[in-house]
Image: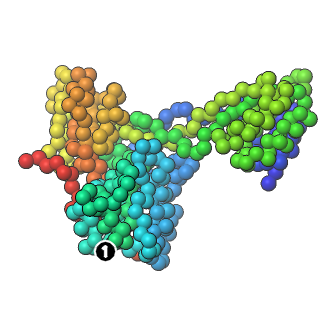
Amino acid sequence: MFATCREFSGRLFHLGFNLSCSISFKTSTFHPIAQLSTSHHPLLSTSRFPVLRSARVIRYLSDFTHPTAYMDLKGVLEVLEQLAPLSLAESWDNVGLLVEPSKPRPIKTILLTNDLTTAVMDEAVAMNCDLIVSYHPPLFRPFKRLLQKDWKQRLAVRAVECGIAIFSPHTSWDSVEGGVNDWLVGGMGSGKVSVLSQAHSSSPQKHRLEFFCVNDEELNSLLEQLRHIEGSENVQCSALRNESGGQQVNLIFNSLALTAAVQILVSHPHASRSLNITQVQQPPLLGCGQGRLGVLDEPVSVSTAVQKMKTHLGLPHLRLALGDQQTLDSLVKTVAVCAGSGASVIQGVKADLYITGEMSHHEVLDAVSKGTSVILSDHSNSERGFLAVFKQRLNARLGDTVTVAISQRDQDPLQVV
């Protein structure tokens, strides 16, 4: 396919590779989105199916029809990817398919769990489960051997022996719009919600190359050479003619083609003297990222906030640290949340209340000293309730051919006694 690059005067350059071109009156035609927008919604009840707005994840649940036959593992993994792209996970995380059986079999039963423990594995084997979706990855650090003396290695061996696949979404569920953190902040009621740590596109890094050509002949010669570079199929191009007839050219290459493109440009006298290279900022994925900040439509007291979260999390007890000069009757207008161990995300955020699973003693003291109250539920208690929401979404995609169950043996290891 051939494309053209239009200059300011209206003439067309004919290029031998696919260029996304535009008319430019400036030295750049790429304007990355920098503004973090907020969404205003009744904070995500289990019956609400959100729309994921990034280019990689725009999906409506109603767009999908139910399959008429059993799905294989590949088909189920595609559905899981649609619900929460693994590209949203943190770089340090170990997400995706962790155990793949050697013999393919239809996926008839899926077990959802927050943590894969020995008790949950017993449950999965007893129900003849085909796939375990474990929010936390049971396999995280590299193994050099698989032995029975380590409990996680035993789980991996047993899964392989029983032909059970294991998949973990972890921080991709935290990040995705409508995921764990949106569900968690939803326990406080309706309001405006924004992302605390914005997720950005995971597409290959791009660089802008700006240079000057004295005439059309020189520019066409350069473009002819550049079109043969591997990975240059979707280069973005713009050119601006000056009064003397020269061309100020902007090209945006992905990182794979950058070195080859620079080598070509530095071999040309005019282009090499004027060459300027800048890294292009990756666009944000709106609504996706770690942690949430909620501005409540109707402020509530600290006491009411505690009761709301007990109900939302299904817990009889929570731990509360009152902020400096705060009481149970103090009003909460803003709340910062991060499921699990969220101090690294919410620490330093200005809010009336922090809600997370766990924080260290000194992290709590720091928050309290700034007048922020803290609610702690213990780690997995801040996450587990989302499994019911995800079950509904998965059922809507898979239909009646797959049984989706939530583990009855999964629980936080810490209990109040």
Residue 373 visible (yes or no): no
| Residue 364 % position (x, y) | 23, 30
Looking at the image, which residue sits at the far left? 417
Secondary structure at badge 1 equals: loop
Q: Is residue 161 above or below residue 26?
A: below
Amino acid identity at mark 1:
Asn
> In the visual, does 417 lie left or right of 278?
left
Picture coordinates of residue 251, whole percent (x, y)? 74, 36
Q: Nearer the viewer, residue 187 or 129?
A: 129
Q: Is residue 399 left or right of residue 127?
A: right
Q: Position of residue 336 (x, y in %)?
A: 32, 35
Residue to which mark 1 is pinned: 128
Estimate how packed mark 1 is, as few (under 14), some (14 to 19) or many (20 or more) residues with alpha carbons within 10 Å. Answer: some
Q: Is residue 302 visible?
A: yes
Q: Residue furthest bottom?
A: 69
Q: Is residue 211 above or below residue 399?
A: above
Q: Residue at x 51, y 56 (%)?
A: 59
User: Which residue occupies 79% across, 30% down?
Assistant: 266
The residue depicted at 25 percent of the width and 45 percent of the height is 379
Most foreground residue, 172 or 301: 172
Question: Is residue 28 depicted above or below 140 in this figure?
Answer: above
Q: Quadrant of the N terminus?
A: bottom right
Write the residue at 86% across / 41% down.
13
**Measured from the top left, where is residue 310 in percent x and y?**
19, 46
Q: Nearer the viewer, residue 45 or 250?
A: 250
Closer-to-camera residue (337/269): 269
Query: How is the protein colored in the picture?
Result: rainbow
